[in-house]
Image (cartoon, grey):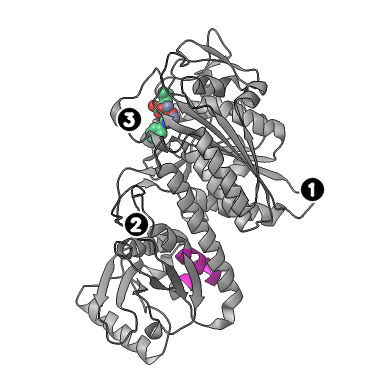
């Protein structure tokens, strides 16, 4: 998608659509041109009639507006301008983009609302508009003969003056990359297990690295055996598809002694539950069980494209959890890479077994801060619903940093407790621990299980089982992969680089 910023007058822009954000209070845009005044009068009349309130996400489409060169005009509510955040602006822009992209368009112009410039600063406002326009116009109908959604050929973000060209160009480029990275993560999640399996993901990452320029290493079966990843390999053994661990490095820091941030992703390309098999209802969306890995891939790609001054390393543990004569079984005792032995009492608690070995590997290879992302437990969705990410940590300071980045980008993260008594629930009579605890507190016992493999490294585990995948579409969001936490982790990586890189 071609993206540009322009300071062309709204009325002169030749486009299929002109999108104008309307606040619930005050004027839409500060312009004083005759056109702005006439548009304001139009908005005032629509407000009086109750057709337009400026409520967040409310839309009103008008055709054949005589004052403008664009073919159609779309008003989208941005809510109370004093309360505007990146999250709210993003929601408004995605809603508009989703509506417009139902029909084929070439050029779409988005007014960058003045309220956004005032509250978020120009570059962040432009970045958000650009990224969310890109996300909103791309759908999940990857296999439809007749597409129902049409990505725009080009978007133009309209700003007030040219004096701000540098900030605008920077925001635009960031938004472009962030939008495409979110869509990459979404696409990887949306493709079914027949297309997305450990080898194909590794191949895709290799191709990506050629275009985007980061280092890749793929650990194949023999290397994983040599590394004694007994826990990950046990999950993989029931599948015809061999496992992979993909390592991606972006060494962007400029200081010689800059620390490293490692991201670890669960990449279960399909989770049937194994012998503790899921019923169809619970299994039907389990192509999404590699969303943590897809998030890591999206973030590394963005960091490399944006040349963020940070040392970032991504690890994705890729396996398929299947049923066969060779599946791992209940009662099996696994020897993890770290040496910790694990009694398997449920083969559907496989994500933690994969992460155990990859976390241990990441820590041994060296990192100063660690984050893992995983669609790990249904219990986390029960606890927090499907729009809030569960956070678990061994280091409050680091967790606060992660939460602050998420807060800035408007993604919802909520920390859950990690009291010692939860670890007691994983004690086993035959091994060092078992892979499941009792039903209650299931998201926390899963996190306590992982904690054993991170040593003293400041670590945050993010359970994205709810937010990573939307069951159905709504105004601002297409069903399927959502790209949850890509925005936040790019923000975090940028901050990490700015403060430490
Ligand atoms: N992949 C699932 C968790 C999941 C559930 C992801 C819903 C996305 C949406 C995970 O591997 C799993 O099956 N967890 C079990 C753990 C249980 C056996 C302790 C669960 O949540 O039921
Ligand atoms: Zn499972
Ligand atoms: Zn799983």
Which residue is situated farthest in the bottom direction here? 34
Please give the label number shown on residue 95. Answer: none
Earlier sequence position, callout 2 versus callout 1? 1
x, y percent for residue 202: 56, 38
**Pointer 1: what residue?**
257
Seen at 33% across and 60% down, the residue is 98
Earlier sequence position, callout 3 versus callout 2? 3
Q: Nearer the viewer, residue 125 or 5?
A: 5
Task: Locate residue 228: give its quadrant.
Answer: top right
Secondary structure of residue under mark 3 = helix
x, y percent for residue 339: 65, 17
Which residue is situated farthest in the left direction here? 49
Q: Which range is magenta?
A: 116-130
Label 3 lies in ligand 1 vicinity (Cβ under 8 Å): yes
Task: Locate residue 322: give its quadrant.
Answer: top left
Q: Nearer the viewer, residue 226 or 374?
A: 226
The reply to whether the C-beta atoms of the residues labelled 3 and 2 are less than 8 Å apart is no
Q: What distance separates the C-alpha of mark 3 from that of mark 2?
A: 25 Å
Considering the whole magenta stretch, tell me its main secondary structure.
helix
**Pointer 2: what residue?**
476
Please give the label number shown on residue 282. Answer: 3
x, y percent for residue 126: 50, 69
């Amino acid at each position: 998608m071609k993206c540009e910023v322009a300071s062309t007058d709204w009325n002169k822009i030749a486009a299929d659509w002109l999108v104008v954000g309307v606040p619930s209070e005050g004027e839409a845009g500060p312009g004083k041109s005759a056109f702005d005044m006439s548009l304001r009068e139009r908005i005032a009349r629509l407000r009086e009639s109750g057709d337009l309130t400026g409520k967040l996400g409310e839309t009103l489409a008008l055709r054949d507006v005589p004052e403008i060169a664009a073919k159609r005009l779309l008003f989208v509510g941005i809510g109370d301008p004093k309360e505007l955040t990146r999250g709210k602006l993003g929601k408004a822009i995605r809603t508009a983009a989703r509506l417009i992209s139902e029909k084929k368009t070439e050029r779409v112009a988005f007014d960058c609302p003045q309220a956004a410039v005032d509250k978020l600063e120009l570059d962040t406002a432009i970045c958000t508009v650009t990224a969310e326009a890109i996300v909103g116009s791309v759908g999940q109908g990857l296999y439809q003969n007749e597409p129902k959604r049409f990505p725009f050929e080009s978007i133009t973000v309209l700003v007030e003056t040219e004096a701000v060209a540098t900030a605008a160009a920077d925001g635009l480029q960031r938004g472009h990359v962030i939008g495409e990275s979110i869509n990459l993560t979404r696409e990887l999640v949306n493709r079914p297990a027949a297309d997305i399996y450990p080898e194909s993901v590794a191949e895709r990452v290799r191709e990506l690295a050629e275009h985007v320029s980061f280092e890749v290493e793929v650990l194949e079966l023999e290397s994983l055996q040599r590394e004694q990843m007994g826990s990950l390999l046990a999950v993989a053994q029931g599948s015809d598809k061999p496992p992979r661990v993909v390592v991606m490095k972006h060494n962007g820091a400029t200081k010689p002694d800059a620390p490293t941030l490692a991201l670890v992703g669960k990449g279960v390309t399909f989770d049937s539950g194994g012998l503790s098999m899921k019923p169809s209802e619970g299994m039907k969306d389990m192509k999404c069980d590699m969303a943590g890995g897809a998030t890591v891939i999206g973030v590394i790609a963005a960091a490399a494209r944006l040349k963020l001054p940070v040392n970032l390393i991504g690890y994705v543990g890729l396996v398929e959890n299947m049923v066969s004569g060779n599946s791992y079984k209940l009662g099996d005792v696994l020897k993890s890479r770290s040496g910790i032995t694990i009694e398997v009492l449920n083969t559907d608690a496989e994500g933690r077994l994969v992460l155990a070995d990859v976390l241990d590997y990441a820590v041994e290879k060296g990192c100063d801060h660690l984050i893992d992302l995983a669609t790990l437990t249904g219990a986390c969705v029960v606890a927090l619903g499907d729009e809030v990410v569960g956070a678990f940590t061994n280091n409050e300071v680091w967790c606060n940093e992660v939460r602050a980045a998420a807060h800035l980008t408007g993604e919802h993260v909520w920390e859950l407790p990690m009291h010692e008594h939860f670890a007691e629930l994983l004690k086993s009579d035959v091994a060092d621990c078992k892979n499941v605890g009792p039903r209650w507190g299931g998201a926390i016992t899963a996190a306590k299980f992982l904690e054993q493999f991170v040593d003293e490294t400041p670590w945050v585990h993010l359970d994205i089982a709810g937010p990573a995948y939307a069951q159905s579409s709504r105004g601002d969001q297409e069903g399927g992969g959502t790209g949850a936490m890509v925005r936040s982790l790019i923000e975090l990586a940028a901050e990490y680089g700015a403060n430490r890189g």
